[in-house]
Image (spheres, grey):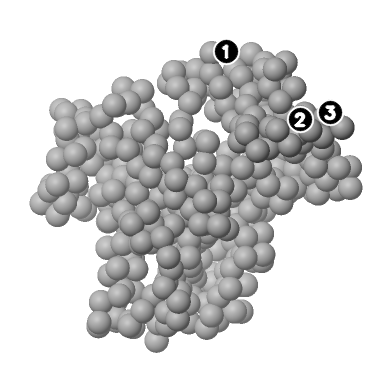
């Protein structure tokens, strides 16, 4: 009875379990990550000197590992390089009752829209580092809402930072309702190629076994989480060598093929958006898209022709980043459309992605 009462007290008090590493505190859901992935994040935090505020936007989930919290409203200030800690603009994450990211300005989705733009990807498609309205799916939707294109369009963005094509295939099977003629933007690769101790598929199978489900359920008790918070801390950083990736190259090709096939069978029109997807994984994505006769967009290569035009096309946004980076922007020109990790697009990068897709789609996207 005592522990039941304590569980209730912790629940209604809004207790948020955590784990510690040196002087840093991580949300407890991060223990769901592969140990090697978590160790790499520990290294990043130790180097940067802070824990990204956006990691507190997620909750553990048995099937996917973690998902965005429902009814969330979080303003993120520290999320990129420590050098530009106070110089980059903050951004907001808001979610609905189902944990889908929504607009803070217009949180209700219009019903009865004629068409849907589905987005299935990772952090870049989620819009990491930018407000919902500035993400490329939303900007693309605004362009497509012009009278010459379509009378109405709804955006359903299933993207989640850190997700791989394996989790994307699960989301497609579980949650996505694609109507005939709907557009589906797919973007995976960077996280698939990430080194790990076990692949996503192996971890999923272990976690969803009978023993794994029992262990996972017990670990959800706040009493246990509270006691672990008092006594448990992450060990000193040790990153063992591994030949494993979260998703092997072969599995990546199979997952993309299955995603494309399923979308086409439902009457959807898939497009592959390659963002921060380099090396052999990028090549496999392009080959798989080509075999399925699916449009392939390669960023940041598509950005390059716009380098000399960015300050004219987006004067206000350019000033924001010039104020943050100063003369470094003249030397590292990619900072005009990418964040300091030279991977995630900033607001200008998202606008350029939306423009490039719109130009490709212009002239009857839903015909």
Q: Residues within 10 Å of mark 3 (few under 14, many from 20)?
A: few
Q: CA distance from mark 1 to mark 3?
A: 32 Å
Discs 1/3, front: 3
Measured along the vertical axis of the image, is residue 275 above or below residue 212? Answer: below
Q: Which residue is mark 1?
A: 22
Pointer 3 residue: 2
Q: Percent x, y for residue 15? A: 63, 32
At 59% from the left and 61% from the top, the residue drawn is 256
- Asked if residue 190 is positioned above or below residue 134 in the image, the reply reads above
* Proximity of marks 2 and 3: CB atoms separated by less than 8 Å: yes
Using residue 354 as the reference point, say whether residue 327 is left or right of it.
Answer: left
Marking on residue 145: none
Label drawn at residue 6: 2
Residue occupying image coordinates x 39% and y 57% = 103
Secondary structure under tag 1 reads loop
Secondary structure at numbered mark 3: helix
Q: Residue at x 70, y 42 (%)?
A: 199
Residue 191: x and y in percent read 55, 44
Indicate which disc, 1 or 3, sits on the residue closer to the N terminus. Answer: 3
Q: CA distance from mark 2 to mark 3?
A: 6 Å
Residue 355, compared with residue 349, is above or below; it is: below
- CB within 8 Å, label 1 to label 3: no
Between the C-alphas of marks 2 and 1, the distance is: 28 Å
């Amino acid at each position: 009875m005592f522990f039941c009462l304590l569980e209730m007290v912790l629940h209604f008090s809004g207790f948020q379990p955590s784990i510690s590493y040196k002087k840093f505190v991580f949300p407890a859901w991060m223990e769901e990550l592969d140990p090697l992935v978590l160790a790499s994040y520990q290294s990043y935090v130790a180097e940067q000197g802070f824990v990204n505020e956006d990691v507190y936007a997620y909750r553990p989930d048995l099937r996917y590992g973690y998902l965005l919290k429902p009814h969330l409203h979080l303003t993120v200030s520290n999320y990129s390089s420590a050098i530009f800690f106070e110089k980059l603009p903050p951004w907001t994450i808001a979610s609905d009752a189902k944990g889908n990211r929504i607009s803070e300005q217009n949180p209700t989705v219009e019903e009865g829209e004629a068409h849907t733009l589905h987005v299935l990807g990772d952090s870049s498609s989620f819009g990491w580092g930018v407000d919902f309205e500035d993400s490329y799916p939303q900007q693309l939707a605004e362009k497509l809402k012009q009278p010459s294109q379509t009378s109405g369009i709804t955006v359903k963005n299933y993207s989640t930072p850190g997700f791989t094509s394996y989790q994307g295939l699960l989301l497609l099977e579980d949650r996505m309702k694609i109507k005939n003629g709907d557009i589906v933007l797919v973007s995976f690769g960077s996280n698939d190629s990430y080194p790990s101790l076990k692949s996503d598929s192996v971890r999923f199978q272990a976690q969803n076994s009978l023993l794994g489900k029992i262990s996972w359920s017990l670990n959800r008790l706040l009493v246990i989480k509270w006691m672990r918070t008092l006594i448990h801390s992450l060990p000193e950083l040790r990153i063992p060598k591994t030949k494993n990736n979260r998703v092997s190259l072969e599995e990546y090709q199979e997952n993309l093929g299955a995603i494309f096939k399923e979308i086409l069978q439902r009457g959807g029109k898939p497009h592959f958006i390659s963002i921060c997807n380099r090396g052999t994984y990028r090549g496999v994505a392009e080959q798989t898209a080509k075999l399925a006769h699916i449009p392939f967009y390669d960023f940041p290569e598509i950005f390059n022709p716009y380098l000399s035009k960015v300050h004219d096309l987006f004067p206000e946004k350019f000033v924001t980043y010039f104020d943050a980076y100063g003369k470094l922007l003249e030397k590292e020109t990619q900072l005009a459309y990418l964040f300091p990790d030279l991977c995630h697009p900033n607001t200008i990068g998202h606008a350029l992605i939306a423009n490039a897709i719109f130009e490709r789609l212009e002239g009857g996207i839903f015909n």
